[in-house]
């Protein structure tokens, strides 16, 4: 499970004295815990949900990096870049556009999706199976095209 990989890496970082890595991995664990306890009852996140949490964290850090870089705050930009690298280690490998197109096409056939009415169901299945592995804005456009909407 992804959570175990993160905790193992955290323990190794603590033993080897990698302060920035320890800090970044603790932030990941804190975000996961926050998401698990934010509702009325506590839930345990699945790997795709943890990938979603980490993807949001990477996006936030990328935005901060851009701001710090434009403002000439190189030390803060470097910290954000380092955190992006650490979090990215636990993300699934990104598919190329061609791989994503093949996966989407196969899923549309598997689900027997035929019209735009099937778009929501198809996108939900894509997100469940390929969370963190493809750009879903591009995927949505391709699904729409395959289902005759564009």
Image: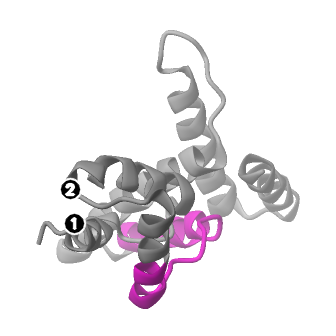
Numbered circle sitting on residue 25: none
Mark 1 or mark 2: which is in front? 2
Circle 2 crowding by C-alpha within 10 Å: few under 14, some 14–19, many from 20: some
Magenta residues, start to end: 75-102
Q: State which tag comes first along the sequence, 1 or 2.
A: 2
What residue do we see at 37% from left, 47% from top?
Answer: 121
Give x and y (percent) for residue 69.
26, 76
Q: Is residue 83 magenta?
A: yes
What residue do we see at 21% from left, 66% from top?
Answer: 144
Give x and y (percent) for residue 83.
52, 65
Q: 1 left or right of 143?
A: right
Q: Give the colouring mode of the picture.
A: one colour
Mark 1 to mark 2: distance in Å? 7 Å
Q: 49 left or right of 108?
A: right
Q: Quadrant of the C terminus?
A: bottom left
Q: What residue is pinned by disc 2?
A: 116
Q: Quadrant of residue 136?
A: bottom left
Asked whether 91 or 61 is in front, the reply is: 91
In the image, residue 35 above or below residue 69: above
Q: 142 left or right of 27?
A: left
Give x and y (percent) for residue 62.
34, 67
Asked if labels 2 and 1 touch by Cβ distance under 8 angstroms, the answer is yes
Instruction: Report helix, strand or loop for mark 2.
Output: helix
Q: Main secondary structure of the magenta part?
A: helix
Instruction: Report helix, strand or loop for mark 1.
Output: helix
Give x and y (percent) for residue 43.
62, 23
Q: Is residue 88 magenta?
A: yes
In the image, residue 58 above or below residue 134: above
């Amino acid at each position: 499970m992804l959570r175990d990989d993160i905790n193992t890496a955290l323990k190794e970082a603590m033993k080897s004295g990698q302060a920035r890595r320890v800090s970044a991995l603790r932030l990941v664990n804190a975000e996961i815990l926050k998401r698990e306890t934010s509702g009325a009852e506590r839930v345990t996140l699945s790997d795709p949900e943890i990938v979603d949490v980490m993807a949001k964290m990477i996006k936030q850090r990328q935005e901060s990096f851009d701001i710090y870089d434009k403002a000439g705050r190189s030390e803060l930009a470097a910290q954000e870049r380092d955190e992006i690298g650490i979090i990215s280690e636990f993300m699934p490998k990104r598919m190329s556009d061609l791989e994503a197109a093949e996966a989407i096409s196969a899923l549309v056939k598997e689900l027997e999706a035929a019209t735009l009415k099937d778009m929501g169901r198809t996108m939900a299945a894509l997100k469940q199976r390929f969370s963190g592995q493809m750009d879903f804005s591009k995927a949505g456009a391709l699904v729409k095209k395959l289902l005759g909407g564009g």
